[in-house]
Amino acid sequence: MRLRLRLIGPVRLTGPEGNDRTPTGRKACGMLALLGTAPDLRMPRSQVQDRLWSQSPPAQGAASLRQAIRELRQALGDGLLAGNGWIGLDPAAVAVDLRPMTGPTGQPVEFAEGLNIRDPEFEDWLRDMRLSLEDRVPEPNVPLLVLTEPKGDAPSAQLLAGCVLEEASARAAALLPTRVVQAADCLTGLRIESLAVARPDNCALLLMVLRNHKTGAQLWAQHYSLSPLEASLRRVSACVTLTLIQAARQLMPGSEALYPHEDLFSFTRSRLLSADHRLKRFDGPVPQALRAFLRYTLIIERQAPDAHEAFGEAEDLSRQACAMAPGDPIVLSIAALMKSWKGEVSAALDLARLACRVAPGHDLAHLALSQALTDAGRDGDAFAAVARVGFGPIAALGQPSWRLRMAVAQIRLGRLADAEESAAIALSHAPDCRPALRILAALRFKRGDVAGAAAAIETLRQVEPDFSLPLMASPEYPVTTLRRAGLLDVTRSGL
């Protein structure tokens, strides 16, 4: 299997298994950009030296070139070729990817993005190369969301339909990722059609139809009852958002151009790492923030070999995302979760509240707010915050996480039967969900269901190789809520 050299966006070299093999040195990355665009992937050594070390004395430039070649050799192995006066890439070992692409907001992604080498010869070459590539038409990462004007029998009904369509398409675009365009702007995509019929009570009946824009084939149709009430509009918008995401996945099954929704909220290390690998291929603040969230899950579930290192990576990713999009609700929500994990309750509350102000009713924002309120000891408010948005599209994609958040709040409120039900629902969505199994083991034992508790513990032993009841009783094990509520009698049961 070949190495992959991606030159649109940041220079990135990946191995056959998707592992990052990009050199750390800027000049070595510059050499990859030069060789990856050279005829036959080969260049004279003197030309490489002139492009990267034009201001250095010849002997010093030659020495620097040799050092950069050594660095490339470590990254490329046999993929780096050398001959009499030239160096190059082996096309049988290295696949160069120069496909044009768009970022999450639809902007063209730049060649060798962020590569800053202060040499006038290289700067001139890089500028010329970018100019030569910028006129190419990038292919959309996923089917475009083709928005059509709502039809209706009254302006009020059309207005309600327009509100739903605008919010749903914007949220779906952020979660796929993709762009929202008008019907006349493209030939392919996911076309959204709607018909709104006014009713005497100032409400409207909304019919939504999704079609393959290219073929006209109908993918989905549904009608909703809309009222001017904000809660009604948000609930319908959330349903339509989720449908748009599912329809895009139907058009592109297994596509790596979509975010890995099925793995983002999982609790299995292999699936979380797979999602992280896929998210690496996307540029922009949301994928960076989602990669931070994946590490957050790995840490709290004891699946990160070095929790301190993983959290450092998560903080860096979250910080980068905030710098790129300080007002994005997904970015703010995940930054709030990072603060909660560190015990910075006030900062977590501020960030989560800001996310809720930016996007009222956003499900991930309310999940982060619920966590921060739990940390602050405001258990009733924590439950209300997460229960209010359990119908949202992200909540629907990550039901185990939302149900677990509800279960924690319910335990702290003393509603143990409700908490057991929430944990059981979480487990039904994710049979390897460790937190749900811990809660079920404790709560079943508490109410005298020893057989049920034993079944949960046995499953825990299967999905968590080092699990034991003494480990569950230890202060480091992630059952803080059960511990505070005095619900760890099961650890002394001998089951």
Image (cartoon, rainbow, N blue to C red):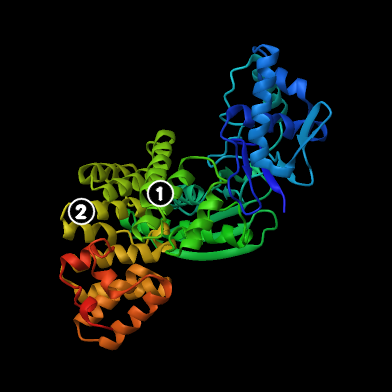
Q: Nearer the viewer, residue 42 or 418?
A: 42
**Real-space CA distance between mark 1 and mark 2, rounded to the nearest whole angstrom:** 22 Å
55 above or below 156?
above
**Residue occupying image coordinates x 47% and y 56%:** 241
Closer to us: 246 or 331: 331
Q: Are circles 1 and 2 on residues that touch, CB within 8 Å?
A: no
Q: Is residue 30 visible?
A: no
Q: Nearer the viewer, residue 212 or 294?
A: 294
Q: Which residue does the numbered mark 1 point to in the structure image?
A: 310
**297 left or right, relative to 474:** right
Q: Position of residue 253 (x, y in %)?
A: 62, 62
User: In the picture, residue 432 is in which quadrant?
Assistant: bottom left
| Image quarter (top left, top right, bottom left or bottom right) of the C terminus | bottom left
Q: Is the residue marked by circle 2 packed among few (<14), some (14-19), or many (20+) residues within 10 Å?
A: some
Label 1: how many Cα within 10 Å (few below 14, some 14–19, many 20+): some
Q: Quadrant of the N terminus?
A: bottom right
Question: x, y (%) of residue 408?
Answer: 24, 65
Q: Which residue is mark 2?
A: 375
The three-letter code of the residue at mark 2 reads: Asp
